[in-house]
Image (spheres, rainbow, N blue to C red):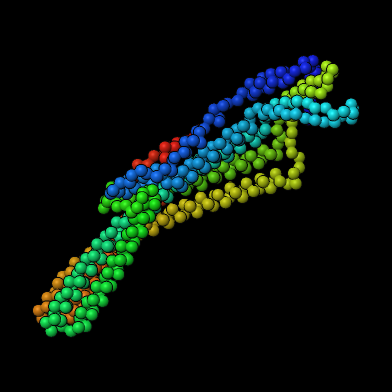
Amino acid sequence: MRSLSADKLKNKTPCAAWALAVSFLSWGGINTTWAQVSDPSIFNGATGQPAQEARQLTMQTAIQQAVNWYPSIAETLGRLYQQNEQVAVARSGALPQVNAGLSSEYRTSSSQTEEAFNITASQMLYDFGKVENEVKAELFGVERDQARVLLAVDQLALEVAQAVINIQRFRTLLAIADDQVNSVTDIQALAERRSALGASTLSDEVQAQSRVEAARAIREQYQSQLTISQNNLSRLIGAQGPVSVADTLPDGLLQVCKAASDQFHNVPEIMVADAQREEARAQIARREADFYPTISAEAGFNQFINQIGNNDDTDVSLRFNVSSSLYQGGATRAQRRSADYVLQALEASKDNVLIELQRRVQDAQEQTRSAKNQIDILNKRVEGMTVTQELYRQQYLSLGTRSLLDLLNAEEEIQQARISMESARYDMYAVQLDCLYASSGFRDMFEISDESIQGISLSPQ
């Protein structure tokens, strides 16, 4: 390290120190725009609950309402802005550094203790990419957290859409259960009338009553599931109490799996993986720079404050420094190897995400095909069993060739086929949501901005 000492000044005031610091800062050229990020107060109230929920929610309004208030979105936004501040921290390494303080030291040459006011200013001149790659790593960290915000939005949208589908599902199944209760109750009444006339036995009444109770138990099960789904949606959108949803689906939802692509570059999970990979590469370059020195300039000023009567009480120095860490027990090389392993892990992580997205789309496409076939088959079965039931009823009442048990079984088969058909239909709707999530289509279909979430910009710089 080379040191150049200037002539000592005769001025006994610290004014020269402040002038030196100001001029040194001006020479360093601070770019204040680097630190211009949004005020933390923008997050205040971002998660306030909606004042009034809609009476009849569509899937789109439910998703938009959830995205506009749900706390997990505000959490990811906060982490995004926190990461953006780390960019400013990294960039500060290329800016002038100023320190001031008081020191007290004992000098053997004068056999006395000397107190001094000191101020130093330093400027990094060249560091072989240490600061540059640190800034790059933090900027890729911002991209990573931007993608995580979008990922949180997509995950929340998927959960809300599934809740809406479940409400529609159990409301439909509840209506079928009501029909079953009413139909079996009618058969029970018929059995009671015939028993009173001596045309049937008491066992017919007992069997009919048992089927009525079973139908009521199934109805209660669907009612409970409907209430749970409504409460779940209320929690997601911040509503007070159960909510009701419309019996509609977004245009184009049923064609999502058919149109799904195997290109996933715009999917947030892939965007997160890509940003993490580039961040790791920047960290590798940063660790490689640690093997090289850092060149800097430094100016210092000391004002001794207890040398009364001594005109030689100030000291100014200018230094040109070339510094390097020669040995740290192998830490630098270990950090470099660690960064390499991180990059390898992230490469594998991206491949794993791609495989999972492909599996999700392929499974959903097959489930869609299967559900359509099931619906067609079950619809024909319902039609056939309806005709059969009517024949059984006539034979039971007129000819006596059919028992009450045949009539009850036919009714149960009809309702079970209807339940299976509607379950297959809503399963088909649900897998469309999986395709929509895997293709990152929620924000486009439901008109959610990629630029601003909960009134907060996704581009804090």
Question: In the picture shown, does residue 393 fall above or below 270?
Answer: below
Q: Quick one: which residue is furthest to the top in this view?
A: 10
Q: Quadrant of the N terminus?
A: top right
Q: Is residue 128 left or right of residue 230?
A: right
All told, the count of numbered labels is 0
**Which image quadrant is residue 280 in?**
top right
At a point 49% along the width and 35% down the height, the residue shown is 41
At a point 33% along the width and 46% down the height, the residue shown is 53
At a point 29% along the width and 56% down the height, the residue shown is 168
Residue 381 in view (yes/no): no
Question: In the picture shown, does residue 302 fall above or below 294?
Answer: above
Q: What x and y, as percent, mark residue 143?
A: 50, 40
**Which image quadrant is residue 118 in?**
top right
Q: What x and y, as percent, mark residue 379?
A: 22, 64
Residue nearest the viewer, comparing 433 with 88: 88
Residue 344 in view (yes/no): yes
Q: Quick one: which residue is furthest to the left in this view?
A: 398
Q: Is residue 273 left or right of residue 386?
A: right
Q: Is residue 324 left or right of residue 170?
A: right
**Which image quadrant is residue 242 in?**
bottom left
Question: In the picture shown, does residue 111 fall above or below 205?
Answer: above
Residue nearest the viewer, comparing 215 with 80: 215
At a point 11% along the width and 78% down the height, the residue shown is 397
Q: What x and y, as percent, mark residue 188?
A: 19, 75
Residue nearest the viewer, comparing 100 with 284: 100
Q: What x and y, as percent, mark residue 13?
A: 75, 18
